[in-house]
Amino acid sequence: MFFFAAALLASAAASANDIYIHAGRVLAEPASGRVLAEQTIVVRHGRIAEVRGGYVDGPGREINLRDKFVLPGLIDSHVHLCHENGPNDRMNRVTMTAADWAIQGARFANITLRAGFTTVANLGDENDAIFALRNGIERGDVPGPRIVAAGHVLSPHGGDGDVHGYRPDVAATIRRSNLCSGADDCSRVVRNQIQRGADIIKIVATGSVLADVAQGVGLQFTDAELQAIVQTAHRMGRRVTAHAHSTDGVNAALRGGVDSIEHGTFLDDASIKLFKASGAYLVPTLLAGATVTAWANDPESFLSAPAKAKALEVGPKMLEMGRRAHAGGVKIAFGTDASVAKHGTNARELSLLVQAGLTPLEAIRAATVGSADHLGLSKEIGSLAPGKLADIVAVDGDPLAAVSELEHVTFVMKAGVVYVDAQD
Ligand SMILES: [Zn+2]
């Protein structure tokens, strides 16, 4: 039956609704690295029907990208679309409703899509606004990237994902449903997040830079809690990604079976062995490291004293961490932690990955096939192959020569719909 359906789809007749993209140069399969010249990408029902040599015409519309470099839509595996960090963070948490966060998220989603990011993973929110934004984008109500949403981050009570810096009675009213203590309680919270709509489970295994509390960046969950979270999430078909800075946090999370590590600042040789043994991905978020370092060194900085101390401990180490992980053969997925850096500047991460030793092609792989695999979406996105979603971007120059070209995309299509076309 499946074969029959696939055969039907492949033979679906060409129609006036088809789109024929004439592409001067195409990196259709980042895994191979092969650049093809003068290709036609045929888009049908939002998916890629075929990639053919030469400039071919058909009954549908033609899009002229003959002087462009064309590649798959970019994927950012770590963003927070509903806000941008700044001096009003603490006040926003007690003044903005979930509806306010959602409307703000719609603006940042549009900015992110227009920067060439056609899929993102949203790893942690104040409330459930992200699920409404995800669903609204999917329905076509508002423009934005496809969203893999985590909802709330899981944290131990009093840990990094709890609320800090408020009067206890205020904290009690804004505390979220993301806190757990003990293995059974952590399983319960994982199930609750999935019930609320989580596509992926995000945990804060260690302290973080921007939490307004002086508890360092070390491990916070117990081993039993980590294992319970991973087992529960996996049995319900969800991946687990762990925010982790300290060495003990990275290694305990990997031993606990998480599928990926966000940041990974103090990873060591033992971590690299654990990454390679399990096949876990690292999401280095070098752009977040560069951004918090700049904030901490700014005398007018809005950071609280504990956040500033942690920024100076973590930020300057991240590029070297990326270098060590890449040299050690760890699988790298692309993620920026945008909301720290401004939404829409996501592609700056590519140049930082190149500074960490990746070639431009390797950096582009991280942002396409790598992140697609990391998020479990390889069948749908990451390359321009027949049957996959027509997520396509283009730039004027050659990103394999200068990866910063991708900071200025001039064409963006998501699922066959054009959102940016420099010719317009
Ligand atoms: Zn984050």
Image (spheres, rainbow, N blue to C red):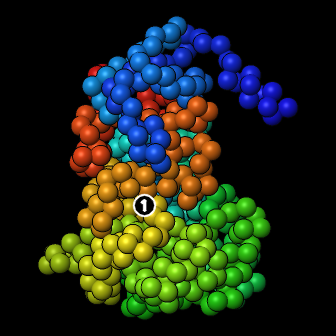
Query: Going by the picture, which residue comes out furthest to the right?
Result: 1
Res 390 visible? yes
Q: Nearer the viewer, residue 135 or 147?
A: 147
Q: Residue at x 30, y 29 (%)?
A: 68
- Point out the residue furthest to the left here: 299
In the displayed structure, 140 sits above or below 304; it is above
Across and down, in percent, residue 49 comes to 58, 25
**Of helix, strand and loop, which one carries label 1?**
loop
Q: 323 and 171: which one is in front?
A: 323
Which residue is at 39% across, 32% downward? 36
Residue shown at the point (71%, 69%) measured from the top left = 233
Q: Position of residue 232 (x, y in %)?
A: 74, 73
Side (left or right) of 108 relative to 180: left
Q: Is residue 325 above or below residue 130?
A: below
User: Does residue 408 sit above or below 67 in this rendering?
Assistant: below
Q: Which of these two is toward me, 214 or 220?
A: 220
Give x and y (percent) for residue 107: 40, 46
Q: Quadrant of residue 277?
A: bottom right
Badge 1: how crowded within 10 Å, few (<14), some, or many (20+)?
many
Question: Does residue 160 appear anywhere in the picture?
Answer: no
User: In the visual, does 326 lie left or right of 127?
Assistant: left
Three-letter residue code for mark 1: Gly
Whether the residue carrying mark 1 lies under 8 Å from ligand 1 is answered with no
* Residue occupying image coordinates x 39% and y 79%: 265
Where 262 sits versus 155, above or below? above
Please provide percent x and percent y for residue 1.
85, 32
Residue placed under numbered mark 1 in the picture = 335
Q: In the picture provided, is 134 more to the left or to the right than 343?
A: right
Q: Is residue 129 left or right of residue 1?
A: left
Taking depth in this image into account, of 392 and 4 the one nearest to the observer is: 4
Tell me the quadrant of the picture where the C terminus can be found.
top left
- The count of marks equals 1
